[in-house]
Image (cartoon, coloured by chain):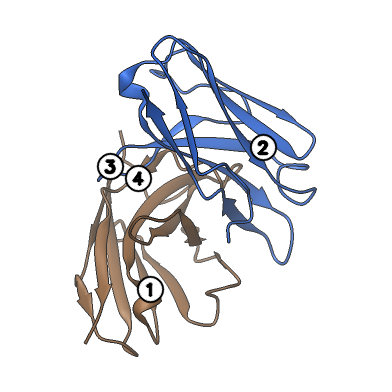
Amino acid sequence: QVQLQESGPGLVKPSETLSLTCSVSGSAISSYYWTWIRQPPGKGLEWIGYIYYNGTTRYNPSLKSRVSISVDTSKNQFSLRLSSVTAADTAVYYCARAPVAAPAAQWGWGQGTLVTVSS
Amino acid sequence: QSVLTQPPSASGTPGQRVTISCSGSSSNIGSNFVYWYQQFPGTAPKLLIYRNNQRPSGVPDRFSGSKSGTSASLAISGLRSEDEADYFCAAWDDSLSGLVVFGGGTKLTVL
């Protein structure tokens, strides 16, 4: 059974870059879409984007200019970078896994990590 | 403003049947599968329904999904107190360069 664990700073200053890593165990990093999703406090889910093990990415157009997802197959990890953050980027950030044939089907999720943007 | 539209709240009494709707468009629900997630406070969402109406192993058959045109529904029969949670619909959207879109979520209260 796949397990995902997010890690990274819980507090980021406005205009700086948010960086999170998701460590994957119980599954090879290949053959799936490795996804980031966020949820502002008390609000709904927003898909940020995914990466395939070969480095192919797809991002939410609303965030595309600020987001970058990378993968490190040797460490079985993938990472999120979101630049020029504002208070609107405060959210619980989840990493998740979806099959290539169904990128909207997140079968496994991390527990989530709250990132607050504040000075 | 979410791409998929859900009612913000729904409620029912134990034993009742409750349905939650999810409305989209031809670029998402109209041409792709719909997925439903269940989320309890402070926890990550869990996949409840996939490919419109399929239940993952371990999901009770009290939960069922359906799709017609550009709308989908989640039905919960024999409502139980432990069903009180937030429910989100999701689908792939073919517009722009393609992305996953979610509904705003429906908070289900068991009275």
Mark 4 and mark 3 on one chain: no
Same chain for mark 4 and mark 1? The answer is yes
Chain at tag 4: A
Is tag 4's residue or tag 1's residue first in the polypeptide sequence? 1
Q: Residues within 10 Å of mark 1 (few under 14, many from 20)?
A: some
Q: Amino acid at mark 2?
A: Phe
For chain B, the rendered hue is blue
Q: From the viewer's perspective, tell me whether residue B29 is left or right of residue A50.
A: right
Picture residue at 33% right of the left edge, 42% below the top: A27
Residue B109 percent coordinates (x, y): 39, 30
Cα distance between the residues tagged 4 and 3: 15 Å
Q: Residue furthest bottom?
A: A15
Residue type at mark 3: give it. Answer: Pro
Q: Residue at x 41, y 70 (%)?
A: A70
Compute the Cα span from label 2 to label 1.
Answer: 29 Å
Residue under label 1, please give it: A89
The image quadrant where one finds the N terminus of chain A is: top left
Q: Quadrant of residue B46?
A: top left
Does the image show residue B27?
yes
Judge if badges 2 and 3 mark residues of a common chain: yes
Q: How many marks?
A: 4
Amino acid under disc 4: Trp
Q: Which residue is mark 3?
A: B41
Label 4 to label 2: alpha-carbon separation: 20 Å
Task: Report which residue position mark 2 lands on.
Answer: B33
Point 67% across, 60% down: residue:
B98
Indicate the chain coloured brown by its letter: A
Mark 1 or 3: the one toward you: 3
- Is residue A87 left or right of A48 when viewed as pictured? left
Label 4 sits on residue:
A109
